[in-house]
Amino acid sequence: MTKIGVLGAGTWGIALARMLSNSGKDVTVWSALEKEVEEYTRTRIHPNLHGMIIPDEIVFTDDIGEACSSKDIILFAVPSVFVRSTTRAAKEFIKDNQIIVDVAKGIEAGTLFTMTQIIRDEMQKPVKLVALSGPTHAEEVANDLPTTIVSACDDLEIAEYVQGIFSNTCMRVYTNPDALGVELCGAMKNIIALAAGISAGLGYGDNTKAALITRGMSEITRLGIEMGCMEQTFSGLAGIGDLIVTATSVHSRNNLCGNLIGKGVSPKEAIKQVGMVVEGINALPAAMELAEKYDVELPIISAVNAVVNDGANPAEIVKMLMAREKKTELSQSAVDVVFENSIIKNKRGTGMKRVITYGTYDLLHYGHINLLKRAKALGDYLIVVLSSDEFNWNEKHKKTYFSYEERKALLESIRYVDLVIPEENWQQKRTDMHEYHIDTFVMGDDWKGKFDFLKEEGVEVVYLPRTPEISSSKIKKDLYDANSVDGESKMSHEDINTDPRS
């Protein structure tokens, strides 16, 4: 029987403990409050989970060692502000390579660590960390209503193990290797939910709420991409899914707190009336630090911070948001794609020959440039279809050093390249040939024969010889061999005299 220790006896910790126990798991729940342990043991009722009975099989304890020792999984379900102190108290009882699942959502001010990063920082020992996040109100999970969630870990095997443990007839679990993106969504969406609540408190309607949700997720996505997260994460369950439920549900503490603030209640009093932790308030300092660090404009999040922490009038802040400089909804890169597509279509039949090629183009080198140069020579307009971060991970099973946006920027700086678009799956090549009116498909000759099926789409298929004796793998190996001895660098920057007169 799988043994699970749950650290934290709040609504989410207890709802998950019940679900796991009902799925046949051996569950021990720890609370730092002796009185809470005694009450739950005696009554088998949580005051904020109405109609739910805690299974008799669940053991409650105020001994954190008992909850952590000899467990297959340790579940961190304490509020974000207590994750570090709880880790510090628990770490001596946690074995090496322990699987730890965190369900708290937040970013630590100062360090800007996510919850799993805090746990790793405090542990100072090898552990396997998973962020479990998504549109999951405890009140609904406690009543076995259908729910979906994401198991996020850069080790897919561990993510899938946790997926198996938490999956049942009421909980469907998906995996995602982008743990940072999933945790960023979990923290930032609470702030947008505060904004939605403030809007409702001011008497605004569904139009306003819809605008805040969509534009709020746009802000979170911009920040996430700058931090190296996968863009697809933000349109998934942990992103827009969690934001929708938090910004609209009657169960949402952040939404309720915002509503009270919009009606004129002070933030301090609003938190008191909610009676539980309001994570969006806790996340604001870190959100503002992240905006400054990554130089990303977050107008809605900044507006919430102005209301909560600077005493700004919510109605006046809304006027300021509405009066901001006029902008396009699309990113500049998306606008460029539309513009380039119009050029292609307008020049159809005028003799312009269109060439397309595909690749990852990580650690761009001379061999890549040579191939692009020869590809462009076969026509007038060269389109490079660049593997997205998700496609690289999910289909090619490899992680790039540079993100999609960084690799795209490098390719766009090359004079042979006219347009860069994303490759999302292996199957899109046939449709690309028609959508972009392609005349010639080009690939390196190490793929010879693999794409001959595209001739059926009416295009010429050309396999160009690779530049001999050069590849990203060979470059990495040669540099490592040249610059190190027994794995140690031969010389550091401190060893080099940069002043020729000395």
Image (cartoon, helix red, strand yellow):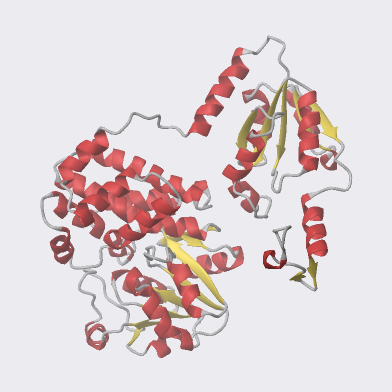
Furthest residue in direction front, as rendered? 501
Query: Where's residue 489, x and y in %?
Result: 74, 68
The front one of 336 and 354 is: 336
Furthest residue in direction right, as rendered? 468
**Which residue lies at the image location 63% right of the left edge and 43% below the top edge?**
407
Query: Where's residue 86, x and y in %?
Result: 38, 80
Asked if residue 365 lies left or right of residue 19, the reply is right
Picture quadrant where residue 45 is located: bottom left
The front one of 262 and 396 is: 262
Q: How many marks?
A: 0
* Whether residue 135 can be seen here: no
Asked if residue 469 lies left or right of residue 172, the reply is right
The relative height of residue 117 versus residue 345 in the rendered view (above or below) is below
The front one of 115 and 53 is: 115
Query: Where's residue 324, x and y in %?
Result: 29, 34
Query: Where's residue 2, x and y in %?
Result: 50, 80
**Which residue lies at the image location 53% right of the left edge and 33% below the top edge?**
333
> Quarter holding the C terminus?
bottom right
**Which residue lies at the image location 36% right of the left edge and 64% below the top edge?**
109
Furthest residue in direction top, as rendered? 350
* Whether residue 377 can be seen here: yes
Asked if residue 211 lies left or right of residue 153, the reply is left
The relative height of residue 394 versus residue 31 in the rendered view (above or below) is above
The relative height of residue 411 versus residue 394 in the rendered view (above or below) is above
**Which residue lies at the image location 80% right of the left edge and 74% below the top edge?**
486
The front one of 37 and 97 is: 97
